[in-house]
Image (cartoon, rainbow, N blue to C red):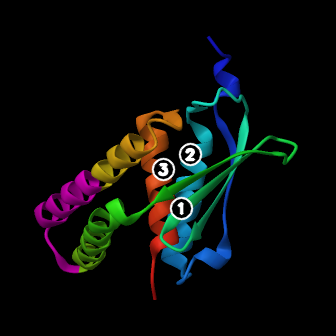
Amino acid sequence: MADSSKLRIADVALDDSSIIRWNPDVDHERRVAIFDLLEDNYFAPKSGIEGPFKLALRMEETRLVIDIHSMDDALLETIRLPLVPFRRIIKEYFVVCESYNQAIKTASRAQIEAIDMGRRGLHNDGADLLRERLADKVEFDDNTARRLFTLICVLQIRG
């Protein structure tokens, strides 16, 4: 079995030009997702390459592109993932997030918790779909999938 310290993401960057709308909330979500991802993750490409890895995420039309680099910045592998199957989940996730942000200003605690449960459920659905769609290319754990899904959402935000 491979050394688990070599099957992890050590750095991740998003192509800023892929992000349509950049505001403090988006920047906060991005920073938290990256921090959490780097703190605890498991990332094992099926090709057998070992890391730790630096990931660069960007959009190419309707595809997510994940460039996997070594720690010395050599490109090891590129994964392209069509995001069309994610459209509904991402759209619903954004709607629920907006509802949540509005609710925390005026709604009761019970209402906020109900919206938050829905938000977390959609987030889990997105993470599960990500794992399913990349199952033949890379293996990762639930937390890694959730953080990567958050970063995909950041790349999908429109003005």
Q: Are marks 3 and 1 in contact (CB under 8 Å)?
A: no
Q: Which secondary structure dominates the residues rendered in magenta?
A: helix
Q: Which residue is mark 2?
A: 37
Quadrant (top left/top right/bottom left/bottom right) for the N terminus: top right
Highlighted range, magenta:
106-122
Pointer 3 with pointer 2, Cβ within 8 A = yes
Query: How far across and how far down the image is residue 111, in percent?
Result: 12, 66
Magenta includes 116? yes
Q: CA distance from mark 2 to mark 1?
A: 18 Å
Amino acid of disc 2: Leu
Secondary structure beneath label 2:
helix
On the image, the x and y values in percent for residue 62 come to 48, 70
Give the Cα distance between marks 3 and 2. 6 Å
Earlier-in-chain disc, 2 versus 1: 2
Q: Secondary structure at mark 3?
A: helix
Q: Residues within 10 Å of mark 1 (few under 14, many from 20)?
A: some
Q: Can you give x and y, in whole percent of width and height, for residue 59 in the image?
A: 57, 69
Q: CA distance from mark 3 to mark 1?
A: 15 Å
